[in-house]
Image: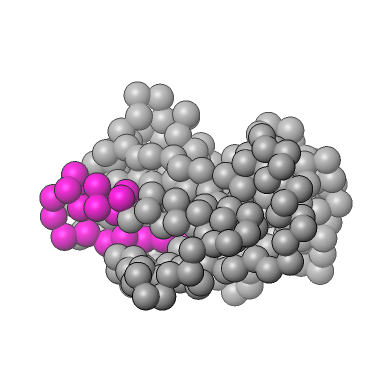
Amino acid sequence: MILTVDIGNSRIKWAQWMAGTIIARGVQPYDKDEVNAALGLAFSGLERPACVYAVCVAGEQVASHLSGWVAANWQCNIDFLVSQEKFEDIIHAYDKPEHHGADRWAALVAARKLYPDESVCVIGAGTAITIDMLNRDGRHLGGYILPSFDTMRAALLASTDKVGSAMSADDNRPQASSLRDSTEAVQVPRDTSQAVEQGLHRLVRAGVRDMCELARRVLDEPQKIVLTGGAAKTILGYPDMPAMSHCPDLVMQGVYTILDNRARGHEGQPASELPGNKDKQ
């Protein structure tokens, strides 16, 4: 059994793999001041893996905690993913690929594996919203980073004392599903909490829609919009969004594909021929 681990800025995600297939998965929120405790909760009850493939965008200290926990509890190897100039037929756009988030790179590789004959726009909806574009020939064109709903909300409350105080006094907080486009259905917010919540949701919706339209123009060919991340379901719930393929395990699939094929010495194999290519989500 192989374990893949994806540590973001607020959640620890894991997946158990057997013969190239995910057999179990889980997620654990965490605070960077209590990483070891969160790792214990995340991996409690899991059998010792043969090895661990990991991606960590939360910094070297968090990655070090993971390495230490694996060594102390499982005594097995751990391999961390870093972005590369090239993987199979995928060519990285960055002059310094190491500056591109390894989770974004993993998602691109997995999207290429799922849709080898199409251009893709990959959206990662996490603490930040990332957008990466890959054309049909496997050339990465680059991408964008937007603040997420939670990030904007935290920044707004940290910068405006009265907004936070007013929101604390408001009881009702509408969900993303309360957003409507038709003039007849719109209820303009009449308290601070709703003004913030609906305003930020509309910003996120507008930003993602604009990025999808930009990708359509830049790629200039039929394409798949592939969505992943903890906030994916919220984005899917917005009205009048373009068609998207929701792939919750996209990063895990990319981490497994790259590192397992490296371990097996299969890095020269075309992405379209990699194991599991037919298992589209």
Q: Give coordinates of residue 252: x percent, y percent.
A: 53, 58
Say if the magenta span includes residue 248.
no
Identify the residue at image location x=35%, y=45%. 132
For this orientation, the residue located farthest to the front is 190
Q: Position of residue 15 (x, y in %)?
A: 61, 64
160, 9: nearer the viewer: 160
Q: Give the quarter of the image for residue 273.
A: bottom left
Residue found 17% across the figure and 48% down from its top: 217
Front in this rendered view, residue 110 or 51: 110
Give left or right: position of 167 versus 146: right
51 or 155, which lies in front? 155
**Residue at point 52%, 67% (across, down):** 176
Picture coordinates of residue 199 (x, y %)?
50, 54
Residue 257, position as x, y percentages in the image: 45, 55
Residue 260 seen anywhere in this rendered image of the structure: no
19 in relation to 98, above or below: below
Is residue 185 shown left or right of residue 148?
Answer: left
* Magenta span of residues: 210-232
From the viewer's perspective, is 64 left or right of 178? Answer: right
